[in-house]
Image: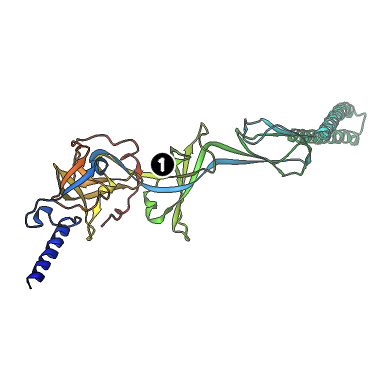
Amino acid sequence: MKRFSALSSAVLAGLLVALAGCGGSGSAPAGAQGGGRAPRTLMLSESDVAVVMTGRMEEGVPITGVLQPSQTISVRARIEGDINAVYAREGEPVRAGQVLARFEASEQVSDQQSARAERVAAQGELATAQWNLEQTQELFRAGAVAERDLRSAQQAVTTARARVAAAAAREQATGSTVRDTRVVAPASAVVERRLVEPGERVAPGAELFTLVRNETLELNAAVPERLATRLAPGQTVRFDAAGRTFEGRVARVSPTIDPNTRSVTVYVQVPNARGELRGGTFASGVVVARTVESTTVVPLPAVRQTAEGDQFVYRIAGRVVEQVPVTLGVVNAAGAQAEVTSGLAAGDRVIVGNVGAVGRGMEVQVIGGDRPPVGSAPAPAGGAAAPGTTTAPPQRER
């Protein structure tokens, strides 16, 4: 019996020691465990401790999509003929009016010269008809010719004028055809594709070149219906593309909701005057819906959650751990930071991440030396100022 009692006492003592080493949500103070035994010391590295700071937080709507040129131009043949020369290649910038290719134009030039000659001849016939009309009018006034002759002269002038007009129209048409033998760029752009080579014969309407205008890119993104009310033209958009950070503006928001995906399309314009971005680049970022200036900011890994859903942090007061309930505002999931509206102040030190068993009242020792508390400080670049999104606080470790 004594042997059994001794064994039970040993097991109970072991359980108490184990409970004393367990921390977490709602745990009793370590100093109260083990009959007043001194609390266990928690060893932390400097990276396990963060300082609460004052900074700027941005709440936004996340978007992803592919950047496309604001305008894609298809240059097509207006006439049928053989290509004599091609002057533009893929990737080359071209100016508005620059010649991209030439057709064999001998037939068109010949037609234009013929039309010009017809117009000159028609003008000569008109001049003769007008002179005859003037002479006939004088003779008619003198009674030397009949009215029938006068009317015939007038009709000759009308016919000559019609011939001049027809010849001028034909000359204009042939001149337009001659101009169409020169394929020119309709706007300043970059050649994306060249679809024709010298010596090829093409039909009217055949695509010769594809040009893109990259000075402004556009991103089309689908946003869930529940977030659509936060979108408006003119909002700032910050996003990452091609390993760099860029900024754009919301240009348009679709007035309807897609019945299949229950999403709204937002159109974002991105200035690209220097051509740093290319069409087809994948981009992800956020539409900044709201900005909070000079607020308390805590690293998101420092925020924990109880089984009941209440959020708290482990704050280091001197060398002792405190479990402090907090209320969050804007949560920046992308920047791993959160706004704290109550529970903390700038300069407080908190434990971040998973550092093992933590309990209230534990003593803390930071390996490498405790960092002294600091007061308000500007948020680091890309930190609190980085855009984020929050609809409901994300679930933390229990």
Quadrant where the N terminus is found in the figure: bottom left
Quadrant where the C terminus is found in the figure: bottom left
Residue 187 falls in which quadrant of the image? top right
Disc 1 secondary structure class:
strand
Residue 9 appears left or right of 290: left
Residue 70, given in percent of the width and then of the height, sits at 54, 40
**Crowd class of label 1 (few under 14; some 14 to 19; many from 20; radius 10 Å):** many
Q: Is residue 343 visible?
A: no
Query: What residue is shown at x 88% (from left), y 26% (from top)?
Result: 135
Colour approach in the figure: rainbow
Q: How many marks?
A: 1
Residue 227 appears left or right of 31: right
Residue 384 falls in which quadrant of the image? top left
For the residue pair 16 and 49, the one nearer the viewer reads as: 16
Residue 188, given in percent of the width and then of the height, sits at 60, 32
Residue 139 appears left or right of 278: right
Query: What residue is shown at x 38% (from left), y 53% (from top)?
Result: 227
For the residue pair 106 and 60, the one nearer the viewer reads as: 60
The amino acid beneath tag 1 is Val
Query: What residue is shown at x 13% (from left), y 57% (from top)?
Result: 28
Residue 168, given in percent of the width and then of the height, sits at 79, 33
Residue 235 falls in which quadrant of the image? top left
Return the residue found at the far bottom: 1
For the residue pair 126 and 37, the one nearer the viewer reads as: 37
Q: Which residue is mark 1?
A: 237
Return the residue found at the far front: 3
Query: What residue is shown at x 13% (from left), y 53% (from top)?
Result: 30
Residue 208 appears left or right of 296: right
Q: Is residue 62 visible?
A: yes
For the residue pair 224 and 164, the one nearer the viewer reads as: 224
